Image (cartoon, rainbow, N blue to C red):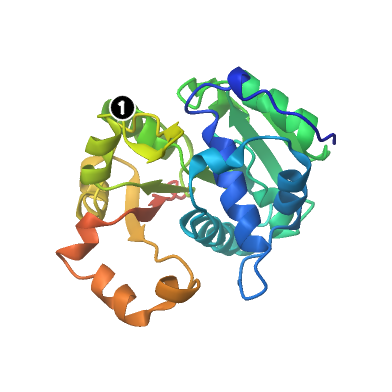
Amino acid sequence: MTEGKIDGAALDSVAATCLWTLRNRAEESMRPASAFRDPLAERLYRGIDYDFDRFGKPSQSHPLRALALDIAIRAYLDRRPAATVVALGEGLQTTYWRLGRPGISWLSVDLPPVIDLRRRLLPQEPRMTAIPASALDHSWMDAPDPGHGVFISAEGLFMYLERGQVMNLIAECAARFPGGQLFFDSIPASLSNRTMKSYRMSARYTAPPMPFSLSVSAAARLPAQIPGVATAEDLQPPLGRRAWRSRTLRKIAILPGPRDLRPSISLLSFAAPPER
């Protein structure tokens, strides 16, 4: 594991977002009152020489999303401890180390420049396998053993893909990994539309285009639309600080109207294989 200067120009607009989410997780982890702890993200953040301020003010959304993912993975591994976790578009996520389960079989699938960055900056683990490929290159699906269970995370990924690509990927995962689960998050259509028109997050940073959006109501219909998808659960992020701790706002966020105007986190469960 090494630290030092990062050439932001080596990462394209989407790949560079791994530094944005890293900053948000590290900043939240360093707050004394936070329920989120990510020591490795803090270490990376302090050691990387990069202009993180260009991303604007830190947000709790990314660390709380990461906490929701931790909870979902742990719940799946409690039922299927020999399962493989596949992290699609993992960036500089440090989920593996936060879980504290070194025996997990873990596949990290990301574009070659990002995999190279992970190799340079993150500890090497014997149970982790890096696959330098796009999540849309379905060859990664040959790696995990579906018989032991497969949990797939697409944290912060789908919004950068086209709708047809996302739906095809979900359908293929459901067909290849019966009994598995898929965790992903989505943005509302209003935000997607803004990013398609050069949405500036700060004076020095324009968000990359995010063509894919999916409302909570639309996600709930996926089991009826995609063979092999048994259930779709809308996950609420854990309680955060200040407004993110308001139980009143959480109640409003699940009402039929408002819920389709907010970002969402979905957990899809795939139908179990038929008994022999």
Q: Quick check: 136 left or right of 162?
A: right
Image quadrant where one finds the N terminus: top right
Residue 88: tell me if it is visible.
Answer: no
Q: Where residue 175 sits: x, y (%)?
A: 40, 35
Q: Where residue 29 sits: x, y (%)?
A: 66, 62
Residue that appears at 44% across and 65% down: 237
Q: Quick check: 139 left or right of 172?
A: right
Residue 92: tell me if it is visible.
Answer: yes
Q: Residue furthest left?
A: 257
In this picture, is 36 found above or below 249?
above
Q: Residues within 10 Å of mark 1 (few under 14, many from 20)?
A: few
Q: Quick check: 199 left or right of 154?
A: left
Q: Quick check: 83 left or right of 159?
A: right
In this picture, is 80 found above or below 128?
below
Residue that appears at 52% across and 43% down: 152
Q: Picture quarter containing residue 202?
A: top left
Figure disc tally: 1
Callout 1 amino acid: Glu
Residue tagged 1: 162
